[in-house]
Image (tube, rainbow, N blue to C red):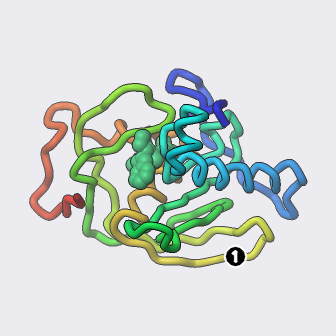
Amino acid sequence: MDTIIREGNPTLREIAEEVRFPLSNEEQILCKEMIEFLKNSQDPELAEKYNLRGGVGLAAPQLDIKKRIIAVHIPSDEQNAEPILSSIMINPKIISHSVQSSCLAEGEGCLSVDREVPGYVVRHSRITLTYFDPEGTSHKIRLKNYPAIVVQHEIDHINGIMFYDHINSQEPFKVENDVTVIS
Ligand SMILES: O=CN(O)C[C@@H](CC1CCCC1)C(=O)N1NCCC[C@H]1C(=O)Nc1ccccn1
Ligand code: NI
């Protein structure tokens, strides 16, 4: 998984392909590896040992694989509690969203971007999305707050969008009055 490609690689700017079911063995293994990577990256020892930056989300294009597969693994704040959200989402699709917008107070980063890009990344506060799990079962879920931000960051990746595309270059920390800043 040290094969995370960096900005400048054209794959990060392409639209990834829909995945067909049933998954190939290779695709099934990829899904497992993506979640494993996130879990390992959040383990202090393993992150130290393999020099990983802890990640809560990963999109297949970041592995130079142009497929609409994303992984999210968002830990809970308490130690050893269940993660808030841990999921592989195949062909994810936002089918509706709030008018209300939100952004992370500390801005966003990306495992494919080895530099700080300061500024608010304004996203939908709440989203309803459909996706398929690796078994091909369709799901429809609603997300808000941080999990909604993470999933939107990942869905951007399969559409060739980087987080800094959303930053207002004139006024990076400008917020319209009705944007919720999440800290
Ligand atoms: O496309 C996917 N990516 O680029 C990995 C990104 C995804 C998140 C960035 C903002 C929303 C989704 C990622 O996870 N990060 N960005 C760069 C370094 C930090 C790291 C991070 O936020 N880590 C974290 C946060 C909370 C708890 C544990 N770890
Ligand atoms: Ni990213």
Total label count?
Answer: 1
Q: Quadrant of the N terminus?
A: top right
Can you give x and y, in whole percent of width and height, for residue 15 in the image?
A: 61, 41
The image quadrant of residue 39 is: bottom right
Q: Which residue is mark 1?
A: 138
> Does the image show residue 170?
yes
Can you give x and y, in whole percent of width and height, for residue 88 in the image?
A: 65, 62
Residue displayed at 54% across by 50% down: 43
Vertical placement of residue 42 versus 161, above or below: below
Can you give x and y, in whole percent of width and height, for residue 11 in the image?
A: 62, 31
Residue displayed at 32% across by 30% down: 116
**Nearer to the camera, 152 or 99:** 152
Can you give x and y, in whole percent of width and height, for residue 114 in the image?
A: 43, 26
Q: Which residue appears farthest toward the front when viewing the image?
A: 45
Q: Is residue 28 left or right of residue 102?
A: right
Q: Quadrant of the C terminus?
A: bottom left
**Nearer to the camera, 129 or 41:** 41
Residue displayed at 36% across by 63% down: 146
**Nearer to the camera, 165 or 61:** 61
Q: Which residue appears farthest toward the top when viewing the image?
A: 8
Q: Is residue 115 left or right of residue 11?
A: left
> Does the image show residue 95?
no
The image quadrant of residue 149 is: bottom left
Residue displayed at 60% across by 56% down: 71
Tag 1: residue type? Ser
